[in-house]
């Protein structure tokens, strides 16, 4: 059996507060093979970004504790690394694409300087070699006039162009794994289509494993084979995208699907939504965390925690699945 | 649901040949835009970012002065009002912004935030104001205990409800929603769309709903207006637009919204569109450079508005398009 490009086993994250430990990510495990894409979906505040930050080891060392059985890239552990070792891994083996390229990029350096710096810190080489690699990365995301983009400061580019440049930066070292956190949320529809297309292209060409984090199931449907639905730090359902859209088993997954506004030739019926809101991590209900918002919940759902019945990467954490 | 009868009802809001430009950018933000919103209906104003949608909203509120053209609210010229008239009109037109975490003051309780418009316009006595704020909170689905709390104590969905409550408290006739659900999660977005549907149905509020998201527009709009680089290119009843978009740009937007790549769309055009800031030649169609169905005439002559006959759906309002594809042979002059 192949070693997955990214493997996460039993990852948990807590906030350490004066009143005790507050769980924000609860025993999350998954793996992504080279060239595959998996989606992690859920509402804001469900622990999606915390999961990503924990995988990258970017959470602060005080106030937060992280525990995992293993986090591996191509079979190599990246969980037990010291700061120096971690810096050697970030950007080279695993890279992140952020939601807001405007804030993730440095306004005082040109795109070329920023992308070149990532490559240089990992691989070094002559100035000319670094520049050539940087320009190739820009061309690989479709910039025909790579020199112009390299000379531009982030504010001189439109939102979609900045996100493309950000992708060039994330891929300049050809990492095995990319985590894309809401890569298209702030963009218009044509930019969104192009960004997703470019990421799929890189995924195939470099056999990159991509973890898409999004609240938007439409993005995940377009780009991912597998999907995990997260709620209050827990994986509620894990399955392939097609099954999720045709037959969601967890009521929370079904709720998320019903929230997507659809474009139809005739006027659609009024949209449905999931009542209530995500509880704060300090205020998690007993039993299944989704029970208070769930129309199918019964007594045992409020008393015991349903475990994920994971069979070959498919399963739902629910006593009364659909 | 509202079925606007265009001929009979006078519009609540009408823009006539509205143009405005920003000196420092040396570009035209809004270029001869005319549109009407019938009372009780919802107009969805769509287009990519930078098309001029928000500039129109700001001009309607009197926040920026147009270079030329007219803005009529119930037949009165907003752009010619003195400050006092403008103030009383503003009570009738309210705005909901995109991001409630920025548009709500962090230092004011929800109660103070909701009271302020009432005090500013001098609406009712203290008793009325107290009752009104409680009632409006109920309308948007919040608990009365919210009055004493601060915005940061609420989730983003609740914050947007508060922003909508603030807009509703003066009993406006027209609500302008500028990307009001764009920054929200799909689940919260659905809740806010449900609230907007209640406001349309039970309160008869007229909406100018600005969004780049056609799926959102489909949920709530009676009519659709499509903008591109400052110009309006297509206006249509929503049912007609979503089944038979006429303008090549309207079709492009709809394809993308359906997750399809539109015919004739290329990556090169996407880059070109984003690197060219100039609005093109005044004598050409504004979309000519990127149009998959461009003809020679598109680069030399600006198209006129055409009224496309609506024979199959006579109950719907007019469908107008600014495109050379619709020439005199099968259309009438608008």
Image (cartoon, rainbow, N blue to C red):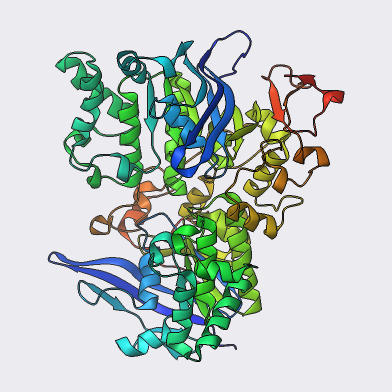
| Image quadrant where one finds the N terminus of chain A | bottom right
Q: Toward which corner of the image does residue A236 lie, by quadrant? A: bottom left
Height in image: B166 above or below B186?
above
Height in image: B323 above or below B258?
above
Residue B101 image point, x, y percent: 31, 45
Residue A3 visible in the current orientation: yes
Q: Residue furthest left?
A: A18
Height in image: B101 above or below A55?
above
The residue nearer to you, when weighing B315 against B75, is B75
Residue A311 visible in the current orientation: no
At 53% from the left edge and 40% from the top edge, which residue is drawn? B27
The residue nearer to you, when weighing B261 against A308, is B261
- Please give the count of numbered marks on the rendered protein: 0
Q: Residue furthest right?
A: B329
The residue nearer to you, when weighing B155 against B61, is B61
In the displayed structure image, the side of residue A205 where residue A105 appears, left or right: left
In the displayed structure image, the side of residue A261 where residue A12 appears, left or right: left
Residue A95 image point, x, y percent: 46, 76
At 36% from the left edge and 16% from the top edge, which residue is drawn? B89
Residue B20 image point, x, y percent: 50, 31
Q: Toward which corner of the image does residue A317 lie, by quadrant? A: bottom left
At 38% from the left edge and 67% from the top edge, which residue is drawn? A108
At 63% from the left edge and 63% from the top edge, which residue is drawn? A197
Height in image: A142 above or below B48?
below
The residue nearer to you, when weighing A228 against A150, is A150
């Amino acid at each position: 059996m192949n070693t997955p490009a990214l493997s996460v086993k039993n990852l948990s994250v807590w906030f350490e507060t004066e009143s005790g430990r507050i769980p924000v990510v609860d025993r999350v495990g998954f793996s992504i093979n080279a060239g595959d894409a998996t989606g992690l979906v859920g509402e804001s505040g469900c622990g999606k970004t915390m999961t990503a930050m924990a995988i990258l080891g970017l959470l602060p060392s005080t106030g937060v504790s992280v525990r995992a059985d293993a986090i591996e890239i191509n079979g190599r552990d990246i969980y037990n690394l010291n700061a120096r070792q971690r810096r050697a891994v970030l950007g080279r083996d695993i890279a992140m694409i952020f939601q807001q390229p405007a804030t993730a990029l440095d306004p005082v350096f040109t795109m070329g300087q920023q992308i070149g710096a990532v490559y240089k810190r990992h691989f070094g080489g002559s100035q000319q070699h670094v520049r050539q690699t940087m320009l190739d990365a820009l061309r690989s995301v479709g910039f025909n006039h790579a020199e112009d983009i390299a000379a531009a400061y982030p504010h001189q580019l439109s939102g979609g162009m900045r996100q493309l440049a950000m992708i060039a930066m994330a891929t300049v070292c050809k990492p095995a794994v990319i985590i894309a956190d809401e890569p298209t949320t702030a963009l218009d529809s044509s930019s969104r289509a192009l960004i997703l297309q470019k990421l799929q292209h890189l995924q195939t060409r470099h056999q990159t494993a991509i973890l898409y984090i999004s609240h938007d199931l439409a993005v995940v449907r377009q780009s991912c084979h597998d999907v995990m639905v997260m709620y209050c730090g827990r994986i509620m359902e894990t399955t392939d995208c097609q099954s999720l859209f045709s037959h969601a088993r967890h009521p929370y997954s079904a709720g998320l699907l019903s929230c997507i506004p659809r474009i139809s030739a005739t006027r659609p019926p009024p949209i449905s939504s999931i009542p209530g809101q995500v509880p704060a991590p300090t205020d998690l209900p007993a039993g299944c965390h989704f029970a208070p918002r769930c129309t199918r919940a019964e007594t045992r759902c409020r008393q015991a925690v349903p475990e994920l019945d994971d069979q070959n990467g498919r399963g739902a954490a629910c006593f009364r699945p659909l | 649901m509202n079925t606007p009868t265009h001929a009979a009802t006078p519009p609540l809001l009408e823009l006539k040949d509205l143009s405005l430009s920003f000196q420092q950018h040396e570009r035209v933000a809004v270029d001869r835009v005319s549109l009407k919103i019938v009372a009780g209906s919802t107009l969805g104003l769509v287009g990519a970012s930078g098309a001029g949608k928000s500039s129109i909203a700001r001009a309607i509120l009197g926040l920026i002065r147009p270079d030329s053209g007219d803005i009529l609210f119930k037949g009165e010229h907003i752009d010619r009002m003195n400050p006092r008239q403008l103030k009383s009109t503003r009570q009738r037109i309210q705005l909901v912004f995109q991001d409630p975490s920025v548009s709500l003051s962090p230092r004011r309780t929800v109660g103070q935030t909701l009271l302020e418009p009432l005090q500013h316009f001098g609406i009712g006595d203290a008793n009325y104001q107290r009752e009104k704020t409680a009632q409006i909170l109920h309308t948007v689905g919040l608990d009365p205990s919210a009055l004493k709390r601060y915005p940061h104590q609420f989730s983003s969905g609740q914050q947007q409800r508060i922003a909508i409550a603030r807009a509703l408290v003066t009993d406006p006739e027209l609500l302008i929603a500028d990307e009001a659900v764009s920054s929200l999660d799909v689940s919260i977005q659905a809740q806010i769309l449900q609230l907007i549907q209640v406001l349309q149905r039970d309160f008869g509020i007229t909406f100018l709903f600005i969004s780049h998201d056609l799926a959102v527009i489909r949920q709530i709009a009676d009519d659709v207006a499509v903008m591109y680089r400052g110009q309006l290119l297509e206006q249509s009843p929503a049912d007609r637009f979503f089944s038979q978009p006429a303008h090549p740009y309207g079709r492009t937007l709809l394809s993308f919204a359906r997750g399809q790549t539109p015919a004739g769309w290329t990556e090169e055009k996407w880059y070109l569109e984003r690197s060219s800031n100039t609005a093109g030649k005044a004598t050409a169609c504004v979309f000519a450079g990127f149009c998959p169905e461009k003809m020679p005439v598109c680069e030399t002559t600006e198209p006129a508005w055409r009224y496309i006959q609506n024979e199959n759906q006579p109950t719907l309002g007019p469908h107008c398009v600014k495109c050379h594809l619709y020439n005199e042979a099968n259309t009438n002059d608008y």
